[in-house]
Amino acid sequence: MAQLSVKIKENPLILGIESSCDETAAAVIRGRELLSDEIVSSASVQARFGGVVPEIASRAHTDAVDEVVARALKSAGVEKEELDAVAVTYGAGLLGALLVGLSFAKGLAYGLRIPLIGVSHIRGHLAACYLEDRELTPPYVSLLASGGHTAVIHVKTETEFKLVGATRDDAVGEAFDKVARVLSLPYPGGPHVEKLAREGENSVPLPKMLKGLGGYDFSYSGLKTAVINYVHGKEQKGETWSRADVACSFQRAALDILAEKTVEAALEKGVNTVAAGGGVVANGYLREKLAAECERAGLKLVLPSRRHCTDNAAMIAAEGLIRYRAGDFSPLSLNAQASIPLR
Ligand code: KG4
Ligand code: ZN
């Protein structure tokens, strides 16, 4: 396609499309204002298999993408010809699933002669907070807690990040999903562990090894193994044990440290705001803990709504807006990427 000449607008209309895993989503924003936010999930189908089956996800996206985008445009009251750009997740995620959204977005951008903006899913999770607080501006420290990542990030400008700490092994969401399996809870495990934890007490002794790790790094593999060993030990001895107490104790051990280290990092970096993003940030206990720690430290806290913590297209549009304003567009030759380094 010939070079597009784009006159950058302050508050462009951007369509976001997300299809990296089992959610087909589309959203429209005008500047930081969210106009529509549609999502169709194949999670209930995937739950039968205890995880996401890539081929099933790809087919579900193919069936849904056209309608989800049409719905997003309609509920925003926007004709596709009015759009200024199309932002789409190009990675990280399942290749076949990503390709559905990416190909659709390319066709739309080409047909409408507007810029295509390939967005990193992880950057999208971090950008979700810009929709929640339209005044939010860097610098701030952000906690990223999802199924694939656990990290504390110093956001210096909208486009410039510095990794402060990260998990050395499993991601926190992954640990929730594995513990959920041990507790015979359905996929995805996080929300089920949270629900069960409300009925339990913090009475199961789990290692405090996370505290001993230097700097701002995390480790979840030891905690997960300790839960598995506790449950197997009790079952082998024929002793009774409480699933709710395991859920509650695990949740605290997994999440307290995230809130504590994020706030410590914010104080060390001298910023006055903490933000967060990723599926695990939908967890009510983590949200309360972050609020309490930030209040104690005199820091402002910005959390995306729960809906915008788990996968959605509004966050992809929000990151698209940052890239649009920077004039940072993607070529139509952009390919899907299974993994993208956190940077
Ligand atoms: O951000 P996300 O939707 O997808 C990735 O990009 O990874 O995160 C999914 C992860 C899953 O591991 C899921 O179990 C976890 O977020 N999660 C939760 C909660 N809701 C989702 N973990 C704890 N508590 C929740 N309420
Ligand atoms: Zn995600």
Image: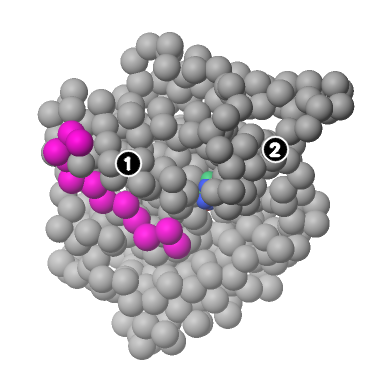
Q: What residue type is labelled 2?
A: Ser
The quarter in which the C terminus is drawn is: top left
Query: Which sits in the foreground, 127 or 1?
Result: 127
Question: Residue at the spot x=26%, y=51% of the render?
Answer: 302
The mark total stands at 2
Decide: few, some or many residues near mark 2? Use Cα within 10 Å; few <14, some 14-19, many ≥20. Answer: some
Q: Which mark is residue 290?
A: 1
Question: Residue at the spot x=24%, y=65% of the render?
Answer: 32
Decide: few, some or many residues near mark 1? Use Cα within 10 Å; few <14, some 14-19, many ≥20. Answer: many
The quarter in which the N terminus is drawn is: bottom left
Q: Which mark is residue 242?
A: 2
**Residue 184 percent across, percent down from the top left:** 76, 44
**Residue 204 percent across, percent down from the top left:** 60, 27
Q: Residue 27, can we see it? A: yes
Would you place residue 13 above or below residue 192 in this image? below
**Residue 124 percent across, percent down from the top left:** 39, 51
Q: Quadrant of residue 40?
A: bottom right
Would you place residue 89 above or below residue 222 in this image? below
Q: What residue type is labelled 1?
A: Leu
Is residue 299 located in the magenta-colored stretch of the structure?
A: yes
